[in-house]
Amino acid sequence: MRKPRWNAVLRRAAAAAVAATALGLWLGSAAAQAPEPLKVIRIGVATGGVGSDPVRHGGTSAALAYTDGGLEEEFRKDGVKVQWTFFKGAGPAVNEALVNKQLDFAWQGDLPSIVHRASDVKTKIILGSGVRGGLYLAVPPDSNIRRLEDLKGRKVAVFKGTNLHLAAVRALADKGLSERDVKLVNLDFPSADAALIAKDVDAAFGYVGLFRLRDQGLAKVVWSASEDSFKYTRQTALLVSDDFAARHPQVVARVVKTVVQYAHKYSDENRRAELFALWGKAEYPEKVWREDFIGQPLRVRLSPLLDPFLVARYKDAADEAHKLKLIRKKPEIDSWFDRRYLDAALKELKLEGYWPVYGSNGELAAL
């Protein structure tokens, strides 16, 4: 692998410092405008969680901040409540709440985010949280399907409208299969599991929940995105509404800084066992998370960076969503990423250069 050129690395560091300084000046100017007092911060999460009090949510730095009450602690002294809403309808349901101005922040995958941007819902991507997430293909135990290419002419379950959908389509396309070659059936995860067990579908794309079926002898997992290419993994990010960011930029900066602190804390390999034990209290057992992260450093999966890799995946998602006629127009992507808050947090916490930078092709670009 080609080593990064250090003059390029230095230029990026200098640019980050300039951006952080500009953000500081901007925050100070915004504070002087004295916006109305903030009483609640509303955060939407594109997953239903588990139980009546869905504290059991795992897999990302945002989940860590939620489970540990990090944001609540950050804003308690200001008398500001942090309200988390978990949406069983996943990304599409989060979009509806954004349209109705019921959320200030949203954690969701690339496809639903692309959909709301294409519909002119005004948000900014401010933090990666859940990048290079796992995607798996499971089939019945007696199936002769061994690889993606074997799916031609088969009935395959996929949760359409989620970031899993486009990642699956992207992987199939690279194997020479279009949606016309494969009959994709829109099923949420519980329905897909039931259909797979009953053999109503030939295969199902899913997440780590498929391991449970495998361990029960009800399915076998025959393909992993991360083992194939990071290009086929799932991406999620934290977004903020333009309106909220304009009125409360300092709050946005504090939210980003808090989540970055959690990302840093648990990117330490010495905490791997602790991390998976914590997530083991979520909807999936500890051993599932250990397997999902096999061969991947914590700094790779818990990175908050808005690097060329993440931007490229959102551009890919926009192209694919338009080709599939999921959106009427392709949204502009580059200006959607607002790095000011993240750059400022990285500078303040002295974490510039801590997480690896990945290039648009999915390969490591810099350390």
Image (cartoon, rainbow, N blue to C red):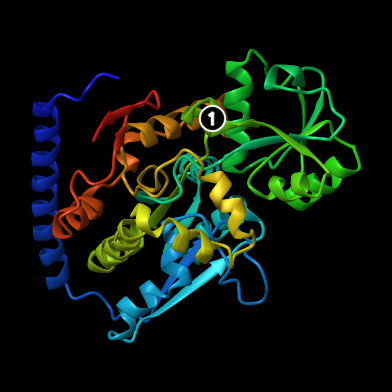
- In this figure, which residue is indicated by the disc labeled 1? 227
The quarter of the image holding the N terminus is: top left
Label count reads 1
Residue at the spot x=52%, y=33% of the render? Answer: 226
Residue at the spot x=37%, y=73% of the render? Answer: 70
Q: Is residue 25 above or below residue 165?
A: below
The quarter of the image holding the C terminus is: top left
Residue 201 in picture, x, y percent from top left: 85, 34
Q: Is residue 38 at all visible to an observer of this figure?
A: no
Image-based side of 290 in relation to 301, left or right: right
Which amino acid type is marked by label 1? Glu
Circle 1 SS class = helix
Residue at the spot x=39%, y=29% of the render? Answer: 312
Q: In this view of the protein, which residue sits in the foreground, 270 or 200?
A: 270
Q: Is residue 328 above or below residue 252?
A: above
Q: In this view of the protein, which residue sits in the foreground, 305 or 320?
A: 305
Residue 10 in picture, x, y percent from top left: 9, 34
